[in-house]
Amino acid sequence: MFSFGSKQSDSQGASQAPQPAVLFKTAVRIRSRAANNATEGIPWIWVCAGALVTILLLIAGLFGVILSQGLSALWPHQVIKIQSENALVLGIPMRQEEGTDPNTNVKQMRRLVYQANRDFGVNEFAFVPVERLVESERPKDVWFVERREWGPFLGRIQTSDSNGVATDVDSKTLSAMLVGGAERSKQLLHIEKGALADLNATMEDLRLEKKSIERQLEAGAIPDDEATAKSSNVESQLARVSKDHAALSTQVQELRSVDEAIKITLLADNGQTKTLPVSQILRVFQPNSLSWIERLGIFFSRLWGFVSEEPREANTEGGVFPALFGTVAMTIIMTVFVLPVGVMTAVYMREIAKQGVLVSLVRIAVNNLAGVPSIVYGVFGVGFFCYTVGASIDQLFFQEKLPNPTFGTGGILWASLTLALLTVPVVIVSTEEALSAVPRSLREASYGCGATRMQTLWNIVLPKALPGVMTGLILAMARAVGEVAPLLMTGVVKLAPALPVDSHFPFVHLERSFMHLGFHIYDLGFQSRSTELSRPMVFASTSLLVAVVLSLNFIAIKIRSQLRKRFEGRGAF
Amino acid sequence: MLNPADLPSTFVHPESCSGPAQISIQNFNLWYGKSQALHSINLPILQHEITSFIGPSGCGKSTLLRAINRLNDLIDNVTVDGDIRVGERSVYERHLDVTSLRKRIGMVFQKSNPFPMSIYENVCYPLRISGITSRATLDEAVETSLRSSALWDEVKDRLKRSALDLSGGQQQRLCIARAIAGNPEVLLMDEPCSALDPISTAKIEELILEMKGRFTVVIVTHSMAQASRVSDHTAFFYLGRLIEAGPTKRLFENAHSKATQDYISGRFG
Ligand SMILES: Nc1ncnc2c1ncn2[C@@H]1O[C@H](COP(=O)(O)OP(=O)(O)OP(=O)(O)O)[C@@H](O)[C@H]1O
Ligand SMILES: [Mg+2]
């Protein structure tokens, strides 16, 4: 699946291979002409510059491949006709390659074609010999339909009147219908995720309370009559809430049946049809009659959908918002832990502890921790945080929910802590360096004013070391965002039922499992039904991950340069 | 050049012992690890007068200065013997609160070392660490110290700007302002002008002269001219020993010991 990417970067590598050699030759010529001491070392300068250029080109190539593939997945491509066995079918041509025909064993140029219509008995992806592609035929009236289920559809859209006579729908009516459908879906979603979810949560709480009363009664912590009174109170509340819940459920049911009555028919090229509720359709457009502006509009709306929507169809479609959110949230939580712990450790080692053998040993140990494979941290995280700390927390505070674990299983908190552990050496090392780089004269000035060690540390040394600390933090964040292995064990999931932050008390649910872009990519690439199907999402998600890393770094670098400016003069306080 | 063995014993002119001594250094020895940097120094430093320390490089002037406010404590392996008294109390008393001692002693260093903060915060740092938060007190202290260090007019419109934007001479005057902001009794200056141009130097010398009568000033200098211009008393050190101390005029015109005469007249150093 990833061979595609590496092939591209290979060609990148090949294209600049001659460059250093050329540079070197020029350098040699310069040297032999001048032939004096002043030019000594010039070849080395060229070699080093060549190495730099190579690296830069490789990086540019890497980003170029990922970004172009990722963005192309969102672009509304044109549809052409393909000569199938007996008919012309619709398809979107994709990459071209040389292959052997399985029947005739003849080498041929062939092209991958995306034909959509998974539920119409069509192979979504097919390799077609290039001569069978009919590029010239681009039917203007073909619709590209993005649906909630079964993937996209290519073909015609019809409505049937009361007599059951089907007619092609015109775009005006269609868009009106779609708006109505979207409205109804939104309404349903609002009830389900809002009021209904609230009622569910309340019912769950009441059930737990009931269990807790029973437990207390068993333990003899409360007298019989009090327990009876309490449970009957809970029972009555539960009954009331259940009634509300039932009423709301009926309302949802009604809305849904209204919604499902408004239908539309999709007619594929192969003559098969499918009738489905309008609200199942998310977006339609006619890919062959779009202007550039419209195409761009669709591209950006898809881009926005990609970052802001939830995934559909086993993550191969829809957006990656929960994964994006999980990645950023996890990184932030990790930062919250790693920064104070790392800085305090470094301060103790550099400023407070007496420098000696013990401190040197600790320093060596910390440096070595940075080299421990990340999966080891994952194992430790699950063993220590989830099964030891988490299980104890459950025993103490969430006994009602047992045997279902609350903190005693993977969750965003444990994943963040594991990553904090993984990255803390980086922060310690760079903080120590920054601390030792604080000039002695500044410390002496502070002590000379009569400051205590803590005052000097807090007012002078730490602020001065802050840019260096930020550097450590940037490195730590960059490493943490990209780590997947430890997360596999400590709480990342393919599809999280809810975000770690929502509108239910206490709003932040650190015990919840979460989605993560890195894992999302891995999952799409290796665990999904079809690699062809998930490839666009893999590249798009990778681009997003790169963008997240870059923007987190960008923010941190901005803060650091702000701090630097402040400590090197210029600017006000 | 003199060998350590041929060094004359310390000679302190009686005029330099005649007033009330703010600092008295008594039989003071100091070692960096195993090597002795100061040998039995005995020297009174008179209150509210200006004393300069002179002597060739490496003779222990800075070491002695830093012994007075115990800044040498920051260096590992320093051992001392003998005593230094500031006012009535011994600096090396067992349970002495070093920070409160240092609050009584301002210090200006050879290289200006303003904090990476605003001008205002730099000057009021000694007050802030003493726990003073009253805006009015701070404002007043900042203004008086900046006026005393002849910096007020130059920076009064940019107090909130970084101290690092100031010129070298301004930075050094800022450090003087910071040193006197806490209203100390003693001001120690370790070659405060060695990194400055002649005009800045003249300004700072003027400041030092103005401080006479308010602070007890000890200044280390390599410039004979400066010592003779600003100081009332001069102490000449050589190879970790105090050779001669006395009124500046006496020392420069008619020194007791040959070594002092030679150094002052520039025959060695
Ligand atoms: N931290 C230190 N550790 C060990 N030896 C030191 C240390 N600081 C100074 N010395 C030694 O102590 C002696 C006196 O040094 P000091 O800095 O007091 O000289 P100084 O008179 O101030 O010289 P200068 O005029 O060059 O500043 C020197 O021989 C120096 O090498
Ligand atoms: Mg010195």
Image (cartoon, helix red, strand yellow):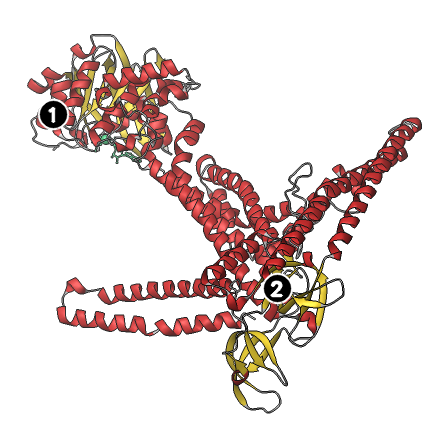
User: Which percent across, then down, holds residue A472?
Assistant: 45, 46
Contact between marks 2 and 1 (CB within 8 A): the answer is no
Q: Quadrant of residue A438?
A: top left
Q: Do discs 2 and 1 share a chain?
A: no
In the image, A483: left or right of A14?
A: right
Tell me, for residue A472, which label it has, or none: none
Residue A174 x/y as whole percent: 62, 59
Q: Residues within 10 Å of mark 2 (few under 14, many from 20)?
A: many
In the depicted structure, whether residue A543 falls above or below residue A153:
above
Residue that label 1 marks: B224
Residue at the (17%, 11%) spot, across then down: B14
Q: Residue at x 79, y 45 (%)?
A: A251
Q: Nearer the viewer, residue B202 or A243?
A: A243
Quadrant placement of the N terminus of chain A:
bottom right
Which quadrant contains ligand 2?
top left
Q: Amino acid at mark 1?
A: Met
Looking at the image, the residue that sits furthest to the top is B19
Comparing B209 with A387, the one in front is A387
Name the residue rendered at 22%, 23% in the picture.
B154
Chain hosting mark 1: B
Gap in Å between the C-alphas at discs 2 and 1?
93 Å
Residue type indicated by callout 2 = Val
Instruction: State the SS at label 2.
Output: strand
Which subunit holds the residue at mark 2? A
For mark 1, give the secondary structure. Answer: helix
Where A202 sits versus A471, above or below? Answer: above
* The quadrant where residue B5 appears: top left
Q: Nearer the viewer, residue B16 or A532?
A: A532
Q: Which residue is mark 2?
A: A145
Q: Is mark 2 within 8 Å of ligand 1?
A: no
Relative horizontal placement of residue A290, taking residue B137 as reference (left or right): right
Viewer-nearest of labels 2 and 1?
2
